[in-house]
Amino acid sequence: MTGIDEVRRILRDLGIDEELMRDDARLRAHLALDSVDLTQIQVELADRYDTRVDLWTGPDYSVRQLAGILDEREPDADADARGEYRDRGWWRQEFLDDLVLGTRVHAGHHAALSDAARTFTRAELDAAVSGCAARLARHGIRSGENVLVQLPNQVRFVVLVLALIRLGARPALALPALREHELDPVLSALAPSALAVPARHQRFDHLRFAERLRGRHPSVRALLVSGPVGPAEGHMDIDRLIEAGHEPPARADRHPSDTALFLLSSGTTGAPKPIARTHEALGHVIRTATAVSGMTPESVFLAVLPVAHGFAFSAPGLLGTLARGGKVVLAQPDEPAAALELIERERVTHCALTPALALRWLTARATYSGHDLSSLQVLQVGGARLDASTAARLADAFDCRIQQVYGMSEGQLNFTRLDDPPEVAFATQGRPSSPGDETLVVDEEGRCVAEGDLGELLVRGPGVITRYHGDASAASFTADGFYRTGDLVRRHPSGNFVVAGRLKDVINRGGEKIPADEMEALVLTHPGVRAAAAVAMPHHVLGEAVCLYVVGADDGAPGLRDIRRHLEDSGLARFKLPERLVEVPALPLTAVGKTDKVRLREDITARLEAEG
């Protein structure tokens, strides 16, 4: 397709009549495009064609001039890799909504999705998605636009996200716990036309929050709201949008290589970055993750982690379960006792947890031991490193396979295999699920380390992105297309990875590097410790030293001297020993259930300042 064809397609999507698209027609003077239209063109050019043009303050481009810019693009360096992915069947000519909702193989009358309020069969879910897509189109949501979706674990989240994808709009999935600091950069980067929020959630006024965001971001035309809210200009009731209906959506000009949706990076090294996921690439991730997770059409997946996060959404998560023909049960992450009841009632086979949430499940299991959990086959744990002792306790308490999952929203996923022996499944974080993934473990100079040595993991493959949206953080990618994960790993003799920590989660004690995860795993082998987090604290001589936060067992936490002796007896080098211990009733958590080390660093800094 030539540049002029591409420009005319974009203008058609904006509703511009064909006869107005003369080569010399200028966007502002002749076509009367407003600020929303200009922003949409900029987003489309950047996202689909990797071309950045200032249509606001730059010249008033004509159709031909804009086409010329597209025709002058450099050859696509990724074209050979994409051709190989398609030739080998890793990328398929399939849309994400069709992969997830197709009824040709899976019976439409089987239950597919439920929350506390309602249940959809597969056919009902497909009809609700089509009906919602048609209603969104009638309310002005157009193919190619972005929509930020910040909804909790409810069926309306699933229906709305799949309807936007079917319409050709791109949902950007945001955790309900994110606020202005995290979302303002995302909205600036994506220029969404709408925000989807609950009216209130967990005592927070999301509607008022969304109104503040709309006031700062002129691209936002409408708010899609769930829950009680009075009539207001630009508000749409999500529950009305997802009512049953079989009407087809407005025709979307789509291709499997298009962006289907945006995930957000975890934000551990700065503001979350939008991650564009195409139908082809995310479909591959879902299929391979589902295969190594042992999912079948009889699988029942309990989603207790926020489903806007990639782990619960597509790794394999709810999308993988639906694609396999199984059932998804949506629940809230802060109710372990209720989750055990759901496992018994719904005959749940699979669930995904973070290590912090897994520890809470262990406590709940000891308290509520009467539930029949015999249906549970696989308990997946990821988002942070799971120590071997906790993995063994989980396997014993729940009498199921413990599958460690180490991955990233950028696309690369590693799983321990269901037939790995316990000494491997409990002590490692898995190997790639995709046969096309390439992995390197390198030192600070980018050279491959010796087998078994510690280094940063670099990855590339059919599910891994090659750039962030808008080319943010370009240094995260090597010249030959590898993604720099920022994770410190070593290869286990089994071929699996052992995650030792983050490059950014390394305590620099007088020039000696101490991976926090490595120490935490050893501390957790002490019988008096239930949870632990190691962070850097300021030191007037060394620069940084190790502060260890611990949650003690019923009899309280061991003292610092006891912990240091335990770590030495475990073989830890003396320079890595903690120099301060703080006992807390619970570790603070981020929105996705990871230990909030930012808060812990702030806490120890404040303690030191108060002590003078």
Image: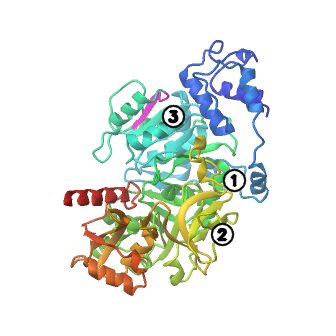
Q: Where residue 448 is drawn, which disc sits there? A: 2
In this orientation, does residue 501 appear? yes
Q: Residue furthest bottom?
A: 569
Considering only order in the chain, which callout, 1 or 3, is on the residue closer to the N terminus? Answer: 3
The N terminus - image quarter: top right
Q: Is residue 274 magenta?
A: no
In the picture, the quarter occupied by the C terminus is bottom left
Asked whether residue 524 appears in the rendered view, the answer is: no
Residue at the limit of the structure toward the front, as seen here: 541
- Element under label 1? loop
Q: Within 10 angstroms of label 2, few (less than 14), some, or many (20 or more) residues?
A: some
Camera-near label (3 vs 1) is 1
Which corner quadrant of the image does residue 374 belong to?
bottom left
For residue 317, side relative to residue 446 (left or right): left
Q: Which residue appears at 31% of the width and 79% of the height?
A: 563
Q: Circle 1 is placed at which residue position?
A: 479
- The mark found on residue 192 in the picture is 3
Q: Residue at x 52, y 75 (%)?
A: 428
Residue 582 % position (x, y):
26, 68
Label 1: how many residues lie within 10 Å, few (<14), some (14-19) or many (20+)? Answer: few
Give amino acid for label 3. Pro
State if disc 3 and disc 2 touch (CB < 8 Å): no
Magenta residues, as a range? 219-225
Residue contact at pointers 3 and 1, CB within 8 angstroms: no
Q: Nearer the viewer, mark 2 or mark 3?
A: 2
Q: Are marks 2 and 1 in contact (CB under 8 Å)?
A: no
112 displayed left or right of 354: right
